[in-house]
Amino acid sequence: MIMTEMTMTEFEAGLQKTRSVLIPFGSIEEHGSHLPLDTDTMQAYEVGRKLAEKRAIFIAAPIHYGVCRSSGQHPGTVSISTETLKGLAYDIVSSLYRQGLRNFILLSGHAGGTHNATLIDAGERLLEKYADLKIAVLTEYMLAAKEGRPLIETEGDAHAGEIETSRILHSHPHLVKGSAEREFPSFPNGILVRNKRKYWPGGVWGDPTRATAEKGRKLEELVVQALDRFVTELEEWEE
């Protein structure tokens, strides 16, 4: 059940089928010279739509902005503060809770550590506020990397590389503008740097030259299957 396409009466009827909702979180962030800025959001929302074809679940409207630290100086990246992201997550879940939903999956297509720690922080606050709420924070990329390990040829592939390029080649091929060179960032250990592009000029973390649409199709299927299992686990979860 795709919330942006539903009427209020359809939403009300949907509550008779499920009290679970997936909220896709993404980012507007550089993904090399070949992938669209909305790559993270596209991946999270796409698997949500596919999941809704398999089971009764609400798929909320995606959040297109996130906390982007390492890529903050690359062209096109639009980052929001941790306070803003935390407030968005908290307010959206609270509103959906008041609408009758009880099981929440915050699925992030953006794998940034600060970004996802912020979502977890919001989730912890929500657990304290609502006694009958269940909530989980998942990184869509980590699901793809784990479930698709036998398919991935590039060790350490993480951003705009083999995995993400394959995913967009499958789901939105018209938005892939060629390819980019294999690259890994060279940030110094522990030192926070101002000029991040000096250590990560191309904005790629992996090898997009090994990407194929067929890999993307298989990765997407594996992520949807893993999500399907996870939603069942969350719905049945008892502390």
Image (cartoon, rainbow, N blue to C red):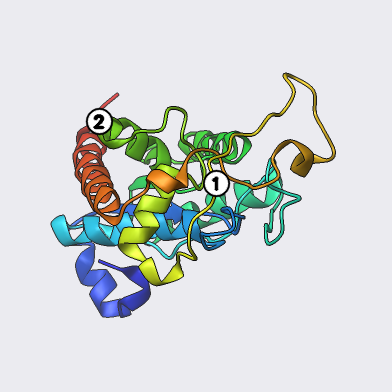
Asked if one can make out residue 108 in the rendered structure from this viewpoint, the answer is no
Quadrant of residue 199 within the rendered picture:
top right
Residue at 25% of width from left, 66% of height from top?
1
Side of 45 relative to 51 (left or right): right
Q: Position of residue 174 (x, y in %)?
A: 40, 72
State whether residue 32 is above or below residue 210: below
Looking at the picture, how far across and down is residue 140, in whole percent?
39, 43
Q: CA distance from mark 1 to mark 2?
A: 22 Å
Q: Check the picture and name the quadrant holding the C terminus.
A: top left
Q: How many marks?
A: 2
**Which label sits on residue 153?**
none
From what the image shows, is residue 66 above or below residue 131? below
What is the residue that sits farthest to the right in this orientation? 194
Q: Give the image quarter of residue 18.
A: bottom left
Please provide percent x and percent y for residue 181.
55, 46
Task: For label 1, count other residues whose C-alpha is less than 10 Å away and answer few (under 14), some (14-19) or many (20+).
Answer: some
**Residue at figure coordinates x 63%, y 36% from the top left:** 114
Within 10 angstroms of label 2, few (less than 14), some, or many (20 or more) residues? few
* Residue located beneath label 2 in the image: 150
- As helix, strand or loop, the secondary structure at mark 1 comes to loop
Left or right of 217 on screen, residue 161: right
Q: Closer to the camera, 172 or 229?
A: 172
Q: Which residue is the site of mark 1?
A: 181
Residue in front for this viewpoint, 121 or 102: 121
Which tag, 1 or 2, sits closer to the chain's start? 2
Asked whether residue 130 is in view, the answer is yes
Q: Is residue 213 left or right of residue 94?
A: left
Q: Amino acid at mark 2?
A: Pro
**In the current view of this chain or complex, which residue is farthest to the top?**
189
Q: Residue at point 26% right, 36% down?
A: 151
Q: Secondary structure at mark 2?
A: helix
